[in-house]
Amino acid sequence: MSRSLTLRTPVLSLRLRVAALRTAALLLAFLAGLALWGMMHGDYPLTLAQIAGVFGADPDPMAEFIVTGLRLPRIAGALIAGAGFGLAGALFQTLSRNDLASPDLIGFSAGAALGAVASVVLMGATGLAVAGGAVAGVALTALVITALAWRDGLQPMRFVLVGVGIGLMLYAAVDYLLTRATGMEAEAAYRWLAGSLNAVGPTELTLGLPVITALLLAAALLERGMARLALGAEVAASLGLPLTALRVAAALTGVLATALAVYVAGPVAFVAFVSGPVARRLAGGGPALLLSALLGATFLTAADLAARLAFAPTQLPVGIFTALCGAPVLIWQIRRQGRGPARKDAS
């Protein structure tokens, strides 16, 4: 059995696995290195001294513009969106007890994208109104998929298959809306739909930072209950767990995390799908919600740096790199589930 530590505060009590803490510390150090590397490199390289000077009393104007106006918002956007995708993936995978049930595969990201694009094309929305459209889109998508997949309970594989079909329909609806958009709107939307952090600005950060903080706090509160739920509904009920309240709270947190991530970075593929299983393996078991969020932030930050620097001066959408990394994992996961014994349906 893996060792664990208990952290008690006036607000919550967390039981943390030593393996998860060790992994989180390494990821944080790696993430700090990635962020510093991202601020230093680009079309206009900067030194450590120049970056330090930006936060001093007399910053160089060009360095200040590059760091605070271009690179730092992009890195912050990757952290927010990656954490949102990673958290959402871990929540929905634990709820359904199926590693294929991540928002990007089962249509939730497509629902958020449709809500955001519809709010822009049909209503001319900007800023927070677009975020509201993304929340409405993913919430309605979750309700529709759950209703269609429900048959004497919510069976994980049926939930996944229905979600995949609904997602394809929603992306078709997005394509139709884009035919009604102006040329500039359609071009910007296509870049955003491929997954891009080019347009992250004050509005996204002002909304994203407090929301992702609240969602991570909610995940910390849900961690123990989700760990028991992962053992099975009957076991969780026998321990006195309020199953309905827990599932509603976890689903709502996952919906908001998906909407926030899609709003900031677009429907980036495979970050949500990859983060949960890898985090659970590194943590030695359990839902690993917070570690999944940290892993998602690391994955998206690294992918965005690769998209920005690998083919410089050409910059590729970050979604291309996440797809290149995530597609082989998806194939492996499907083959593993096909070879192994069928997982018990969640009741």
Image: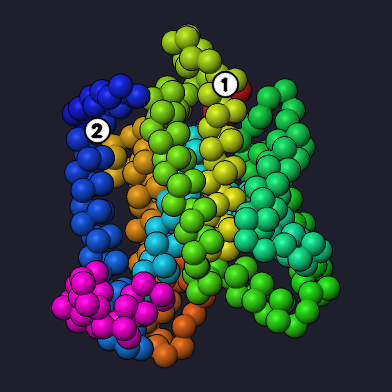
The 10 Å Cα crowd at callout 2, few under 14, some 14 to 19, many 20 or more, is: some
Q: Count the numbered circles shown.
A: 2
User: Residue at image x 70%, y 53%?
Assistant: 133
Q: Looking at the picture, tell me which residue is in the foreground, 84 or 173.
A: 84
Q: Which residue is mark 2?
A: 17
Q: Quadrant of the C terminus?
A: top right
Q: Is residue 144 left or right of residue 94?
A: right
**In x, y percent, where is residue 23?**
23, 47
User: Residue at image x 44%, y 29%?
Assistant: 222
Based on the displayed image, in which of its 4 quarters is residue 101 positioned?
top right
Q: Is residue 105 visible?
A: no
Disc assigned to residue 245: 1
Question: Distance of mark 2 from mark 1, alpha carbons?
Answer: 25 Å
257 in magenta: no
- Mark 2 falls on what kind of element? strand
Residue type at mark 2?
Arg
Q: What residue span does the magenta drawing correspond to?
A: 46-70
Q: Is residue 135 visible?
A: yes
User: Residue at image x 47%, y 40%?
Assistant: 215
The answer to which of marks 2 and 1 sits earlier in the sequence is 2
